[in-house]
Amino acid sequence: MPLHIHDTLRREKRLFEPRDPNRVTLYVCGPTVYDYAHIGNARPPVVFDVLVRLLRRTYGVDKVIYARNVTDVDDKINQKAAREGVPIGEVTARYEAAYLSDMGLLNVSPPDLAPHVTDYIPAIVDQIQAIVDAGCAYAAEGHVLFDVSSYKSYGALSGRNLDDMIAGARVEVAPYKKNPHDFVLWKPSKTDEPSWPSPWGEGRPGWHIECSAMIEQTLGLPIDIHGGGIDLVFPHHENEIAQGVCAHGHAHDDQAHDEYARYWMHNGFLTVDAEKMSKSIGNVLLLHDLVQAMPGEVVRWALLSAHYRQPLDWNQGLLDQSKKSLDRLYGVVRDAVALLSPEQWANAQIQAKTFVPPVYASDVEDPLEDDLNTPGAIAGLFAIASAVRTQMMDVPRTPDHLKGIALGAASLVEMADLLGVLQETPEDWFLGADVELRAEVEALLDKRTTARAAKDWPEADRIRDRLNALNVVVMDGPEGATWRMMG
């Protein structure tokens, strides 16, 4: 089926039709690099990584251009650098490197473009000037502010009425603002803060204008899809549209928003044990810690276990179930490979790269093409796994039968790639241990062999109990003992 996505602006599921099928463009708001990302920050890059994988499978790898920005100038960055007594570039480089490393452990593919705000200051200044020239922004006391009353469709994305917003305004009203909801495009920098020259004095850009300028510079307008978390709908994305449209003189056009982005996608909130993440509660979970404590694929699977537009509650039960689900799929691949020669398995993997039987492909592609229904795609992976498991139970195993098993298992791996999972070999997955654990297990097995040879059964039992505590399964064979993690 063709791809349909829910468009936040139109509040309905729509057939996806790119402006140019040979150049499909996607922009997702990326990290502000002043600290480690929390688990909620990981949901958008994982969700939209699945979308990019699907788009590339549909249109071709070289036909999709994915941009994810890096905000490397911000109040929080300035504060962190001031506390540490270092330039902001030192702070941003440190946490951007950590972010990219953590994304790599989640199997999130790097974007094609990663524009940094500090590289686009001249373009940002130019866009602000264009908005001023269009009569949609004004300078006041070193600031440049967007005049929300100048844009006819302000509030369309979020469904907010401007008159109601102004009447019920609870925002801080600076004396130089015409309207309470006018927002900053440019502001003066404080002493010792980073600053750049502009027609309105030394300063730095406001948050919203950064994305508008970088989108136009890197992808051109209009882009096909703009994505991000639901928390960005207002004010960030609402303001992005207003700026991008008014910079080109479309402030009074009814369909002006189509000149900025053709589709808007937003993922839902993430809670922890049914509570909103909050430093005051003390339940902020850092992604950097999670991916050190468990396989990144488990974290990724958990993030994809709910439909992207729905809320997701993060808890230990979710992680345990995610690990069990992956163990089950890896187990099918492991058992299938055990029946095959290395050549049979290699040939099946090559074949699956170019041809997955439609009955298998549709199990995963159809749900993903229905507004990125990842729970449905996960069910599809289990359907493929069950079919392969059934084939493995049939005897006798003829050459054609083995080919079917091989292609089924290879198809499972290939279709799982759309979700960014089953990226390891089954052997590595079930060992699943760090270097220190592997060394301990190997040492225990050596001691076990010695104890059994000496008929020191109490020592052998002690070693067995220790291996059980480590979740290690020992398999004795004619050539000695082998082991794997329980799964």
Image (spheres, rainbow, N blue to C red):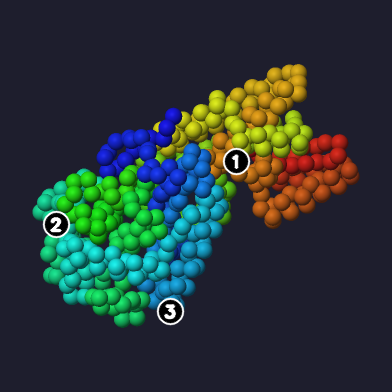
**What distance separates the C-alpha of mark 2 from that of mark 3?**
42 Å
Q: Would you say 74 lies left or right of 470 here? A: left
Whole-number angstrom distance, CA of label 2 to CA of label 1: 51 Å
Residue visible at 80% across and 41% down in the picture = 481
Badge 3 amino acid: Gly
Determine crowd level at label 3: few under 14, some 14-19, many 20+ residues with C-alpha closer than 10 A: few
Residue at x 70%, y 42% (from the top left corner): 427
Disc 1: which residue: 422
Residue 257 location (% of width, % of height): 25, 48
- Check disc 1 and report its element: helix, strand or loop: loop
Q: Quadrant of the N terminus?
A: top left
Q: Which residue is mark 2?
A: 149
Q: Are marks 2 and 3 in contact (CB under 8 Å)?
A: no
Residue 385 sits above or below residue 42 on the image: above
- Compared with 140, 439 (above or below) is above
Nearer to us: label 2 or label 3: 2
The answer to whether residue 292 is above or below residue 416 is: below
Q: Amino acid at mark 1?
A: Leu
The crowding category of the residue bearing disc 2, from other C-alpha atoms within 10 Å (few below 14, some 14 to 19, many at least 20), is some
Amino acid residing under circle 2: Ser
Do residues under tags 3 and 1 come within 8 Å of each other at their CB atoms? no
Which of pointers 3 and 1 lies earlier in the amino acid sequence? Answer: 3
The dot on residue 85 is 3
Camera-nearest residue between 119 and 23: 23
User: How far across and down, in percent of the image, does residue 177 sit?
Assistant: 14, 66
